[in-house]
C-alpha cells in the first residue's frame, strides 16, 4: 500500500501535466532519421525532390534530398535563388555531397525543377524563426517544435543566417536551474532579467507589442553579467571569450538599419543588445533611441531600396545603458515623452554600485560574476528550448485556457502593485513578465518561489518609478527640489525687505508714480479670500527666480503648491492678477497686474513648521 501511494512531488508533477500538458517534440535540423516521399529527378542520381512549398508571401521553394553513402540530407532552395544565383545553390548542394558539378547535371536539375514548379504545395516555409502563422509549430534555429511530418521547413533569409549558430543547446535545463538559478536567488535584477528573456514567444498569445528593457547603471557594475546569464537560456556564441562577454547577446556597434536584421533573426526569441553607447548614430543619441524604440514597437523592417518585402518581428530586447534615456535628452533639442519611455522600460541597479545584492559567499563582485557566467555558458540554450517545448504543448492542448491563465496572472500583478505609481503601459509590461516568469517556475525551469519572484519584480518596478517618474527631469522629486529653492529665495528676499514694504489697498494712501510707491520693493495686501499676500512686480519676480528656472516655470511650481494667486477669468489662466494698490493721480483706483504670493508661505513668523522628512 505504501509503495503505491503518490509522493507529494509526483502528485505536483501529475497536476502540472493535467493543467499544462506534456512538452512537445523537438525535431532537429540535419537529422538523417526522417521519412519523406522522394521523387526521382531525370538525369540526376544523387538529388531527388521531396515536395514543393510556399512561404506566407506565396514564394515557391523546392525541398531537395541529397542521397549520400551514409544517410540523406535535405536542402530547401528558394526558386528565385535558383534563377538569380544558381552558383550559390549548386555550391551548397555540392557541400552536402550532391553530384552537380558538370554543366549537364546542373542543366538537368534546373529543367527537372521547372517541371515541378506548379505542383501543389506540400509544406510551409518560414524565413525567420518563431511561431508559424497558425501557431501549429515553432521554428527554433536548431529545429522544429511541433509536428514531426516535416510540414514546416526553415529557409532563413541570407542576412539572418549569421545569427542562427549561437542558438545552440549544451548541457541541460535542470542543471542550469540548479547551478545558475542558485546563484541568482537573492538578486532581484538577475531574477527579473531571466524572466524578461523568456517573454518574446508569449507576446503573440496576448497581443502585446514589442519593447526594450534597459538595465541602467554605471560601467563595471555587473549589467553585462546579468545580460550574459539571462541570454544564456537561449544559447551562446561559439567563441568562448565572446560568449563570456555577451552570452547570446549582440553588441550595439550597428546602424539602426542593421539592427532590423538582428530583430528579425530573433523573432519570438530572446534578443539582447549590450551597451547602447556603441550604437552608431547621426545627430542626437536620444533621438536615435526614440527611433529604435518606436521602430521595435512597430515590429516591421525599415523600408529600403534593397528590400522586396518588409519583414515583421516580435521580440523583447534586453539591453543596458550607463545613463537613462531621459537624462540623455536633457539639454538637447529632443524631449522624451511617455510614448517612447514606456516602450523603453528602464530599471536602475538595485545598489548604487552593483547589479547584485547577494554574492553567495564570493569575496568580490568580479569573482562572483566570473563564476556565474561560466556556469551559465556550460548549460547554454537548454532552458529556452525546454520553455518553448512546454509552451507549444500547453498552447496546442487548449489555447483559450492558456491565454486565460496568463491574463489572470497579469491582472493579479496589476492589482497587487498598481499602487507603486508606474505608468499603466509599464505596469502592464511588468505584469506580463510576471506571468511568463510564473510559467518558468511552474515548469521547473527557474528555482525561486512565486513570492520571491514577485518581490524581485516589485523592487525593480519601484526603481523604474524613481528613475523615470519621481527623480526624472520634471518628476516629483526634481520639481519638489526646484520649488523648495524658489521658495527659499523668495523667503530670504521677504525677510530682507520686509521693513521697506508698505500696506497696499484702496485706502493705503499710495499714489501711482509717487516716490514712496517707486521705492517700495513690494507691497503687503489683504485679500478677501486668500488672506495676507505679498505683491511683486513682474520684472522683480523674474529677476529673483532666474538662478533656479524661468519665471513661467517658477509660477507653475508655486501654483502646484497653492502659493501664487491665479486669475482664471475670461477662459484664461494667468499668474498676473489685478490688485488695488492705491490710487491714480486723478484719484481713481489704481489696479496694476502683480504677482501675488501667499504671505504665510514667505513670512517665517506665519509659516507652519516643515513636515518631518522620511529617513529613507
Image (tube, rainbow, N blue to C red):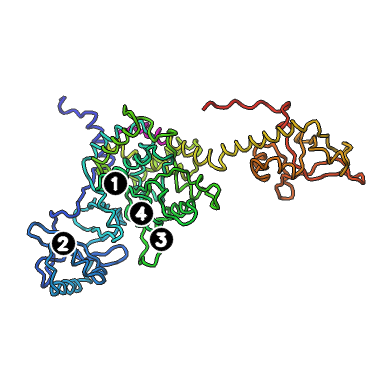
Residue tagged 3? 302
Residue tagged 2? 95
Residue 446 belongs to the span the image colors magenta: no
Residue 449 belongs to the span the image colors magenta: yes
Rendered view: 545 above or below 337: above
Residue tagged 1? 242
Contact check, label 3 and label 1, Cβ < 8 Å: no
Which stretch did the figure color magenta? 447-457
User: In the picture provided, is 341 more to the left or to the right than 582?
Assistant: left
Rendered view: 102 above or below 397: below
Of label 2 and label 3, which has the lower sequence position?
A: 2
Q: Which residue is drawn at 63% across and 34% down?
A: 484
Residue tagged 4? 263
Looking at this rendering, what residue extends furthest in the left direction? 69
Q: In which quarter of the image is residue 258?
A: bottom left
How far apart, in angstroms, are the residues tagged by discs 4 and 2?
29 Å
How far apart, in angstroms, are the residues tagged by discs 1 and 2?
28 Å
Of label 4 and label 1, which has the lower sequence position?
A: 1
User: In the picture provided, is 11 more to the left or to the right than 185?
Assistant: left
Amino acid at each position: 500500500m505504501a509503495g503505491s501511494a503518490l509522493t507529494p512531488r509526483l502528485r505536483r508533477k501529475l497536476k502540472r501535466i493535467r493543467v499544462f500538458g506534456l512538452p512537445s517534440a523537438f525535431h532537429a535540423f540535419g537529422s538523417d532519421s526522417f521519412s519523406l516521399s522522394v521523387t526521382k529527378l531525370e538525369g540526376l542520381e544523387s538529388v531527388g525532390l521531396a515536395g514543393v512549398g510556399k512561404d506566407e508571401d506565396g514564394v515557391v521553394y523546392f525541398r531537395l534530398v541529397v542521397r549520400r553513402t551514409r544517410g540523406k540530407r535535405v536542402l530547401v532552395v528558394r526558386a528565385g535563388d535558383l534563377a538569380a544565383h544558381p552558383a550559390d545553390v549548386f555550391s551548397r548542394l555540392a557541400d552536402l555531397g550532391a553530384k552537380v558539378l558538370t554543366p549537364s547535371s546542373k542543366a538537368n536539375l534546373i529543367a527537372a525543377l521547372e517541371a515541378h514548379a506548379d505542383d501543389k504545395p506540400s509544406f510551409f516555409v518560414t524565413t525567420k524563426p518563431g511561431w508559424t502563422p497558425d501557431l501549429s509549430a515553432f521554428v527554433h534555429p536548431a529545429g522544429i517544435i511541433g509536428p514531426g511530418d516535416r510540414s514546416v521547413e526553415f529557409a532563413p533569409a541570407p542576412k539572418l543566417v549569421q545569427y542562427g549558430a549561437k542558438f545552440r543547446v549544451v548541457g541541460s535545463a535542470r542543471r542550469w536551474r540548479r547551478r545558475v538559478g542558485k546563484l541568482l536567488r537573492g538578486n532581484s535584477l538577475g531574477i527579473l532579467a531571466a524572466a524578461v528573456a523568456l517573454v518574446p514567444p508569449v507576446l503573440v498569445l496576448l497581443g502585446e507589442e514589442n519593447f526594450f528593457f534597459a538595465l541602467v547603471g554605471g560601467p563595471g557594475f555587473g549589467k553585462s553579467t546579468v545580460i550574459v546569464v539571462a541570454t544564456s537560456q537561449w544559447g551562446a556564441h561559439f567563441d568562448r571569450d565572446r560568449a563570456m562577454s555577451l552570452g547570446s547577446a549582440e553588441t550595439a556597434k550597428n546602424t539602426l538599419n542593421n539592427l532590423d536584421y538582428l530583430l528579425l533573426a530573433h523573432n519570438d526569441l530572446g534578443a539582447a543588445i549590450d551597451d547602447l553607447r556603441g550604437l552608431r548614430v547621426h545627430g542626437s543619441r536620444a533621438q536615435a533611441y526614440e527611433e529604435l524604440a518606436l521602430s521595435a514597437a512597430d515590429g516591421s523592417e525599415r523600408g529600403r531600396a534593397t528590400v522586396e518585402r518588409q519583414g515583421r518581428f516580435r521580440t523583447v530586447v534586453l539591453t543596458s545603458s550607463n545613463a537613462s534615456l531621459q537624462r540623455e535628452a536633457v539639454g538637447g533639442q529632443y524631449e522624451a515623452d511617455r510614448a517612447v519611455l514606456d516602450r523603453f522600460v528602464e530599471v536602475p541597479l538595485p545598489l548604487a554600485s552593483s547589479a547584485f545584492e547577494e554574492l553567495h559567499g564570493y569575496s568580490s563582485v568580479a569573482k562572483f560574476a566570473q563564476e556565474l557566467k561560466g556556469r551559465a555558458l556550460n548549460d547554454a540554450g537548454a532552458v529556452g528550448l525546454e520553455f518553448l517545448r512546454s509552451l507549444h504543448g500547453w498552447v496546442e492542448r487548449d489555447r483559450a485556457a492558456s491565454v486565460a491563465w496568463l491574463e489572470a496572472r497579469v491582472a493579479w500583478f496589476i492589482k497587487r502593485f498598481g499602487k507603486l505609481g508606474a505608468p499603466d503601459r509599464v505596469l502592464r509590461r511588468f505584469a506580463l513578465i510576471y506571468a511568463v516568469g510564473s510559467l518558468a517556475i511552474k515548469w521547473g525551469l527557474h528555482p525561486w518561489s512565486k513570492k520571491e519572484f514577485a518581490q524581485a519584480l516589485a523592487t525593480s518596478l519601484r526603481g523604474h518609478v524613481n528613475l523615470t517618474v519621481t527623480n526624472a527631469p520634471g518628476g516629483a522629486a526634481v520639481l519638489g527640489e526646484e520649488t523648495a529653492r524658489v521658495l527659499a529665495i523668495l523667503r530670504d528676499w521677504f525677510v530682507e525687505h520686509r521693513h521697506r514694504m508698505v500696506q497696499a489697498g484702496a485706502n493705503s494712501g499710495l499714489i501711482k508714480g509717487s516716490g514712496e510707491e517707486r521705492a517700495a520693493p513690494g507691497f503687503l495686501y489683504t485679500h478677501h479670500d486668500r488672506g495676507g499676500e505679498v505683491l511683486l512686480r513682474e520684472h522683480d519676480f523674474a529677476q529673483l527666480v532666474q538662478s533656479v528656472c524661468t519665471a513661467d516655470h517658477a509660477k507653475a511650481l508655486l501654483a502646484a503648491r497653492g502659493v501664487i494667486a491665479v486669475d482664471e477669468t475670461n477662459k484664461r489662466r494667468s499668474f498676473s492678477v489685478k490688485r488695488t494698490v492705491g490710487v491714480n493721480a486723478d484719484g481713481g483706483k489704481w489696479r496694476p497686474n502683480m504677482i501675488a504670493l501667499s504671505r504665510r508661505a514667505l513670512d517665517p513668523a506665519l509659516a507652519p513648521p516643515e513636515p518631518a522628512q522620511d529617513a529613507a
